[in-house]
Amino acid sequence: MTNQLRAELLKIRSTRTTMGLLIGLIVLALLFIILTCTLSPVNQVITEQDQVGLLSFGSIAGVFAALAGIMLFTSEYRFGTIRPTFLFNPSRSRLFMSKMVAGALAGLAFGVIGEGLTFAIGMIILKTRGIHISLTGGNITVIIVGTIVGTALWGIIGVGLGAVIPNQVGAVIALLAWGFVVENLVFGLLPSVGRFLPVHAQDSMIGFNTQHYLSGIDGTIVLIGWTVVLTVAGMALLRGRDIN
Amino acid sequence: MAYVVQSDSLSKRYGNVLAVDDLTFKIESGTVTGFLGPNGAGKTTTLRMLLGLATPTSGHATIFDVPYAQLETPAMRVGAVLEATDFHPGRSGRDHLRTLSRAAGLPDARVDQVLELVELDSAAKRRVKGYSLGMRQRLGLAAALLGSPDLLVLDEPANGLDPEGVRWLRDFLRDFASGGRTVLISSHVLAEVAQTVDQVLIINHGRLVTESSLDDLTMRVGGSVRVRGPQLTQLAEALKREGIETTMSNDHALLAHGTTSERVGDVSFAAGLPIHELVTEGSSLEEVFLDLTSGDAS
């Protein structure tokens, strides 16, 4: 599996796709954190929950990590490299696990870079403006660890989703529609159900603790649960499917 | 004799379509086998089942006596090219090979060796999207050769190649097989592989139609060889001594029946008789092939 993992990491590095996603993430995170921290009136960035929401914006890296994870299978199906990949490594479970680890590592890197930038720049701007930081050391640990762990999990979720839906466009649309539309609708209408959905589970992981959200620990367990569900589904479908 | 590939009652059903129907054959080590049939005959499906990419509906296939997925390091035993276009366009040819060599635990030095072997070393660092079809074919072949396999499986490798590419491939395969290694090459055009293979498996509608050596297939050729020359009467006698029937055509050429141009040429050379023209009438082998595959097998 080490050989296959090295192969997967090289696949990530040897095209521009993942680098493009990373640049997209950095640009988006910088734009958001610089603009909101600089332009928001003081009374909107003063409470603990305001600052959690602001400084955890790096968790948007989860979307990018999931997209990078989706690419690991779908671009192989799209360009046909899945055939040589399986010819060189016919063990589908080993291949899946290698991609899973690669997806998690990519997610981890995205999380560290995305949240690191957001948090560091956000803190600098707020302090420069003389705004009191209401976050405790505990808050900060939860934001940073929650975001990075969550993003790594999203990398794995992306791999699983790509194995479930090998069509690249289909998988990307499914992810975005789910994350930006379906979950918000469900959470808005039925928060008692919506809080168990993956994006909202991650929100609770990074310190959102207003009404309806799960506790940080429960959120972590729920997001891990979603990761397991997609992993099992992806692995099962991958093993049963013929390669055309 | 050891069998490199064995297909045992292999069948594959897609919905109502039986793409491969109870296909049984064996391929001996050291042979070059043409796997022939019209488009849609089930060749690619069969190869996918042999290589573990598709699961048979029934029957089973082995390579070196085990199912492909159970080969210890498959890349070191079998090299296969199924599609000429299986590359990420944004990845360089060399990086494509490196992703595969890493999966097989091979060093980068081996990547550079195969790149040189298929004459792609100068284009190795360019993105595949800038490669011509011929270059892509050779890159696919390079990937198959990474592990120095004993068996090469190629699905329609001549598709879309220009004549120079076809010749390059033919020379390459001859070279590969001369070392006692085994080749299984599929095609829907017999003429493409006739100069390379020593035996043929012909399938149609998913069923085995013929399994024979190329020589045996040639013997079935019903066409004739047309000869012109100054001493045709003597040549007719020489051919008759070899058991080859001849007739005279209206335009004073000699027609030799049930034989090949190679044979007629050899006989006339042995008899010391000059010839000015030696042609196979009709498309000979191709006609046999069409005969075998055009009839509805069901």
Image (cartoon, coloured by chain):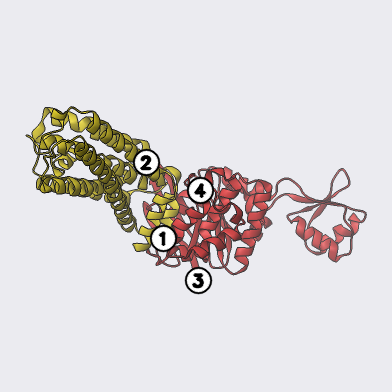
Chain colours: A yellow, B red
Residue B70 image point, x, y percent: 37, 64
Residue B10 in view in this figure: no
Q: How crowded is mark 3: few (under 14 residues within 10 Å), some or many (20 or more)?
A: few
- Left-right relation of B191 to B224: left
Viewer-side label of 2, 1: 2
Q: How far apart are labels 4 and 1 at the CA level?
A: 20 Å
Q: Residue at x 11, y 39 (%)?
A: A134
Label 1 is placed on what type of residue?
Answer: Ala
Q: How far apart are labels 2 and 4 at the CA level?
A: 33 Å
Which chain does the numbered disc 2 sit on? A
Tell me: residue B9, above or below residue B83: below
Residue A106 image point, x, y percent: 32, 50
Label 4 is placed on what type of residue?
Answer: Glu
Give the secondary structure at mark 1.
Answer: helix
Q: How crowded is mark 1: few (under 14 residues within 10 Å), some or many (20 or more)?
A: many
Could you say which disc has been placed on residue B103 in the image?
1
Q: Which of marks 4 and 1 is nearer the N terminus?
A: 4
Viewer-side label of 3, 4: 4
Could you say which disc has been placed on residue A23 in the image?
2
Disc 3 with disc 2 on a shared chain: no
Q: Name the residue under label 3.
A: B2
Tell me: residue A122, above or below residue B156: above
Viewer-nearest residue: B231 or B168: B168
